[in-house]
Image (cartoon, grey):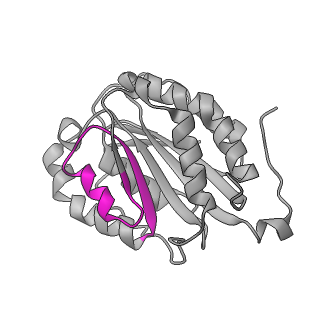
Amino acid sequence: MGLQIKQNKTMMSQHKLADIMFCIDNSGSMTDCINGVRNTVSNFVASLEAGVQGLSPVDWQIGLLNYSADEFIFVDLANDTSRFKKKLEKREVSGDEFTPGAIDFAISNASWRTGAQRVVVVFTDEDLKGGYSPSRSAGRFDKLMEKIVNSHIQIIYYGEQCPYYSQFTKCPKGEVNVVSNFSGISFNELMTRLAVTVSSGNAFAGKEPVVKELVYDLSHVRIKKI
């Protein structure tokens, strides 16, 4: 039986709120990344439950978007690690990456809670110009940045050097980590650092609704919500 946490309502009100959506490039070259997240998510959740280095416990939700240019597989935010881990499976797909579109969709469709720290963690092995329809993606990127800021989303990016994705550092608490070989990432370190971030306070908590309107045309994308 998977891990499901039932938290006392009184205790939950004293916890920091964190909604964390993982957007994972679903191409075959990303297998190491997907396996790494699968293998360490339990440690990450344990850190959130217990608090890290004496920091406050976290009332958390995690979700997942596996994406390619033509298919998004979406698992909404929930306090259920068993469901999350079952969906972190290798899927062989064709086509390019569509990272801007995936971020756009995740922001619009995830069940973000009012007052929660909203985090999108992105893993991809392609820059914007190496993915789907580079000119179209670049042409709307400023609008995507506005949406991220107005929706109070913290972006943590892991991937190739890219002049567009480097702009995530301009978003409040945004991080850009340039990675060319995902097998060299310390996922335990990433998860622990993320746990520290969400445990340390709700300085950038989302008190306003997210922007639901999509920036990109996703009419060509097969969308599976599971």
**Residue nearest the observer in this picture, 28 or 116:** 116
Who's the residue at 13% across and 48% down the image? 135
Location of residue 111 in the rendering, given as x and y in whole percent from the top left corner: 58, 60
In this view, 128 is above or below 89: below
Location of residue 123 in the rendering, given as x and y in whole percent from the top left corner: 40, 39
Magenta includes 118? Answer: no
Location of residue 191 in the rendering, given as x and y in whole percent from the top left corner: 57, 42
The reply to whether residue 158 is in sight is yes
Extreme residue in the bottom direction: 208
Who's the residue at 43% across and 69% down the image? 151
Q: Is residue 79 left or right of residue 157?
A: right
Magenta includes 166? Answer: yes
Location of residue 128 in the rendering, given as x and y in whole percent from the top left corner: 22, 43
Quarter of the image for the C terminus: give it: top right
The reply to whether residue 74 is in sight is no
Who's the residue at 33% across and 35% down the image? 179
In this view, 128 is above or below 118: above
Q: In this view, does 161 lie to the left or right of 93?
A: left
Q: In this view, does 161 lie to the left or right of 197?
A: left
Quarter of the image for the N terminus: give it: top right
Who's the residue at 36% across and 36% down the image? 68
Span shown in magenta: 151-175
How many numbered marks does the figure carry?
A: 0
Snapshot quadrant of residue 108: bottom left
